[in-house]
Image (cartoon, rainbow, N blue to C red):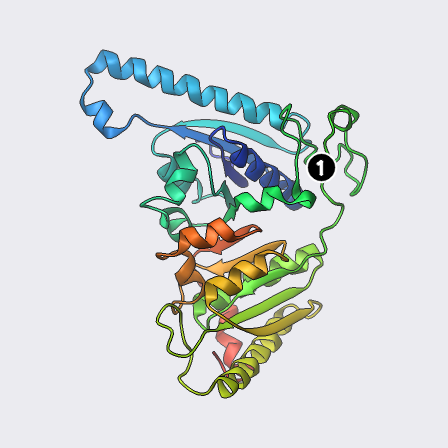
Amino acid sequence: MTQEKPGVVVGVDGSEQSLRATHWAAAEAYRRSLPLTVVTAYSIPAFAASSMDGGYAMMDDSSLRAGAERVMDEAKQFLRDYPGELDYRIESGDPTAVLLEYSDDAEMLVVGSRGRGGFFGRLLGSVSSALPAHAKCPTVLVPLKFSAKEENAVTTATGAIPIVSSSSQPGAAAPESLIEEGAHPLRAQDARPVVAGVDGSDYGRVAALVAAQEAAERGVTLRLVCALPPLGSTLVWIPTHIEDSDALAELEEKLKAGRSWLNSHFPDLTIEVEVIDGTAVDVLVEETRRAQLTVLGTRGRGGFAGMLLGSTSQGVLQHAEGPLMVVPDGEDERIQDRADFGPVL
């Protein structure tokens, strides 16, 4: 890897889903005026390497490298009209480990939730929590259903996509070559809200601060949502064992206090708060249908983040319809004054 900061890093594996994650990552990198780094990785499976002598291992490495180069060629074709700073890197090593190493210096990691293995198979396999749980920067997972929506659709017949216009002016026309191919530019401005799932933990509050920053930069509303699961449920965090009506009133009071706290740091931001009946997963999935970004912490009291990174992570990703940002554990001095604004979850 070079010494330059990689900016927004997206992992690709040659699948259409990874290219659509690349579409989201490219738009985000351009919006943030950051470099876009496209990464693919390959490695010889341990069982295969151990059964080969040096010559065969070298041949297999060459074949895998050639496959990675084809994947990267597809990504280059896909991004050929991208006007921002762009870098392509082929790495040798375990894909998850490679991305985790990039997370040390990246502003954000972006991956799709389906693919031909590599990053994507691992996210939904036995190490499904490795990337979002251990990355040093926020990780965005772009679900399969996100790309199926008409407003997020891209043209993949030729690999071309107008990530942004060739002009620096928002809403300007896409390059003629892409229009001729039937591609559609991204909307000039996405008015959908940013959502933060909160559960009363400091990790959740750090994620809420990140979500507030994302909403402020996009000029949209921030929604703070908290699930009120059925009493007696053992699957999610239950804040208190009292009657539903009392629990609802208590949670609403604490969410409103949280809103006041966030507004003290983001005075111009419009913030909505809502306590919603249902399990954390059901509430989260429903929110992703209307949000441009849903933000969660990597730890919590078994609520949103715990469900995302726990045994039900596959179900969440299978049904989510918008990008999910998982914010890593971290410290933020702004949470120290949260108690000054009222009762805490």
| Residue drawn at (40%, 84%) of the image | 241
Residue 26: x %, y % from top left: 61, 38
| Residue drawn at (53%, 81%) of the image | 254
Residue 66: x %, y % from top left: 42, 17
Left of 58 or right of it: where is 79? right
Q: Classify 10 Å Cα crowding around label 1: few (below 14), some (14-19), many (20 and above).
A: many
- From what the image shows, is residue 47 above or below residue 243? above
Q: Amino acid at mark 1?
A: Val
Q: Is residue 211 visible?
A: no
Nearest to the observer: residue 270 or residue 323: 323
The quadrant holding residue 46 is top left
Residue for badge 1:
164
Left of 48 or right of it: where is 118? right
Nearest to the observer: residue 344 or residue 84: 344
Q: Secondary structure at mark 1?
A: loop
Residue 1: x %, y % from top left: 43, 31
Left of 99 or right of it: where is 44? left
- From what the image shows, is residue 121 above or below residue 306? above
| Residue drawn at (52%, 71%) of the image | 226
- Marks counted in the figure total 1
Residue 133: x %, y % from top left: 38, 53
The quadrant holding residue 186 is top right
Q: Is residue 78 visible?
A: yes
